[in-house]
Amino acid sequence: MKKRFFPYLLIGLSALLVFIGFVPTILSTKMAKDQMLKEINNRIPGRLAIDQWSFGWLDGIQCEKVAYKNNGANISIRIDRIAVPKGLLALAFNYQAPGLIEIIRPQGIIALPGKVLPPGEPGENESPSSSESEVSIFGNTPSNDSENRSGEKARRFVLPPIAAEIKISGGSMKIIYPNKKEEVIAKGLMLNFN
């Protein structure tokens, strides 16, 4: 009886190890990314979009072409790349200490009251009449950033406490005044936070 059970146990453990080995590959797929972004966007004000991401057990986490916009707050941010050198294995043991987080070339826009974000900038200008027909990196987004796609109020999203060093390089910040004047208030930002 034990001899018959052992091959099934061995096959089951082998299948489990193969599945665990493929977890980073599965998480790096477009389908997994879209599902995670859907869950995140249902919980935050505004919309988050990520063009591509990749995970590895040892290689770290990379997010390419990250964009966030919140029409209600007139804020728009685009980031070329976010990199966390710690892989999933290290984060599985201590997710609250991701180590260094690199934010490469963030570009922020703040539109002061009286002016909404311009088309073609990080975040498309959406009005209730145009939000259904306009498609951008964000897809069809509701005009009210506090509501999700099903019309429900967005649930509160709280990040867990983390201890990380954040390095920002090549950043810029632009303000759009109500009189349509645009002013770059910071360019070539290089910041380190602990």
Image (spheres, rainbow, N blue to C red):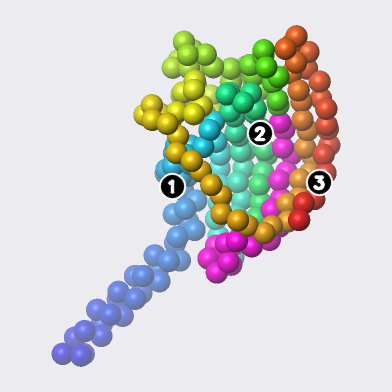
Q: Is residue 4 left or right of residue 97?
A: left
- Identify which amino acid the numbered label 3 is placed on: Leu
Q: Which mark is residue 191?
A: 3
Q: Residues within 10 Å of mark 1 (few under 14, many from 20)?
A: few
Residue at 72% x, 12% y is: 178
Specify the quadrant that holds the C terminus. bottom right
Answer whether labels 3 and 2 touch (C-beta < 8 Å): no
Q: Nearer the viewer, mark 3 or mark 2?
A: 3
**What residue is disc 1 on?**
32
Specify the quadrant that holds the N terminus. bottom left
Residue at 49% x, 58% y is: 24
- Identify which amino acid the numbered label 1 is placed on: Ala
* Secondary-structure class at tag 2: strand
* Mark found first going from the N terminus, 1 or 3: 1
Nearer to the camera, 85 or 110: 110
- Identify which amino acid the numbered label 2 is placed on: Arg
**What residue is disc 2 on?**
78
* Mark found first going from the N terminus, 3 or 2: 2
Percent from the top left, x then y, of residue 109?
A: 71, 26
Residue at 44% x, 42% y is: 39
Res. 90 image quadrant: bottom right
Nearer to the camera, 129 or 159: 159
Nearer to the camera, 111 or 23: 111
| Magenta-highlighted residues | 86-108
In the image, residue 82 sits, relative to residue 91, either above or below, namely above
Q: Is residue 49 shown to the viewer in this render?
A: no
Whether the magenta-drawn stretch holds residue 99 is answered as yes
